[in-house]
Image: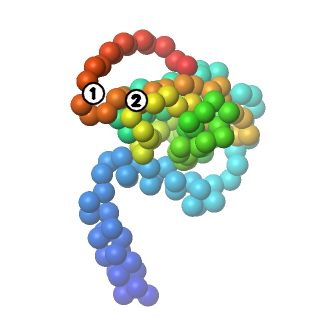
């Protein structure tokens, strides 16, 4: 049995040798789904703080939300990002844990998107769905023209 575990660990180590921080966060976010995390019921809509996005890159963005009123120390939160506001063309989805020691906030790093495009995103937790946010990826690595504006607000 110990030999099998050692082989498994060696195989796992070989696979993660070139893993980036973003790959690790995405893989870590999937753990609740793999572990059969039970569905948490929340007393009221946990998304009163809204949703936000930031740190746009040509192929990704960071999505954010914070849960309100969660009593559990770990709350599974799913997210989706789509090419349309009706979520008919899903561009990505995943799961993260909202941890009590981090104020039940969630930062989902999304990658694999197309440059210079608008996307719509939302979060789901405890049977509740957040408001829909809209974000945009940065233009390609070397755009002919680039405009940048900064606004500090959620949604």
CA gap between label 2 and label 1 equals 10 Å
Image location of residue 18, percent across then percent down: 26, 60
Is there CB contact under 8 Å for labels 2 and 1?
yes
Q: Secondary structure at mark 1?
A: loop
Q: Rate crowding at label 2 as few (under 14), some (14 to 19) or many (20 or more) other CA atoms within 10 Å.
A: some
Q: Earlier in the sequence, mark 2 or mark 1?
A: 2
| Quadrant of the snapshot with the C terminus | top right
Q: Quadrant of the N terminus?
A: bottom left
| Coordinates of residue 38 in the picture (x, y in percent) | 68, 53
Residue depicted at x 43% and y 13%: 152
Q: Is residue 36 left or right of residue 145?
A: right
- Residue visible at 32% across and 63% down in the picture: 16
At 61% from the left and 42% from the top, the residue drawn is 89
Direction from residue 32 to residue 38 in the image, left or right: right
Please say whether residue 88 is visible from this viewpoint: yes
Vertical order, 110 against 24 (above or below):
above
* Numbered circle sitting on residue 116: 2
Callout 2 secondary element: loop
Name the foreground residue: 130 vs 120: 120
Name the residue that disc number 1 marks: 143
């Amino acid at each position: 049995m110990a030999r099998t575990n050692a082989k498994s660990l060696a195989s796992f180590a070989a696979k993660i040798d070139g893993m980036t921080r973003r790959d690790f966060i995405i893989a870590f976010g999937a753990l609740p789904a793999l572990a059969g995390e039970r569905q948490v019921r929340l007393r009221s809509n946990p998304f009163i703080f809204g949703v936000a996005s930031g740190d746009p890159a040509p192929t990704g963005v960071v999505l954010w939300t914070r849960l309100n009123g969660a009593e559990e120390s770990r709350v599974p939160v799913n997210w989706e990002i789509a090419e349309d506001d009706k979520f008919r063309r899903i561009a990505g989805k995943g799961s993260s844990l909202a941890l009590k020691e981090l104020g039940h906030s969630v930062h989902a790093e999304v990658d694999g998107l197309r440059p210079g495009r608008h996307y719509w995103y939302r979060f789901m937790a405890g049977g509740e769905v957040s408001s829909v946010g809209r974000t945009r990826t940065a233009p390609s690595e070397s755009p002919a023209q680039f405009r940048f504006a900064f606004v500090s607000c959620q949604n």
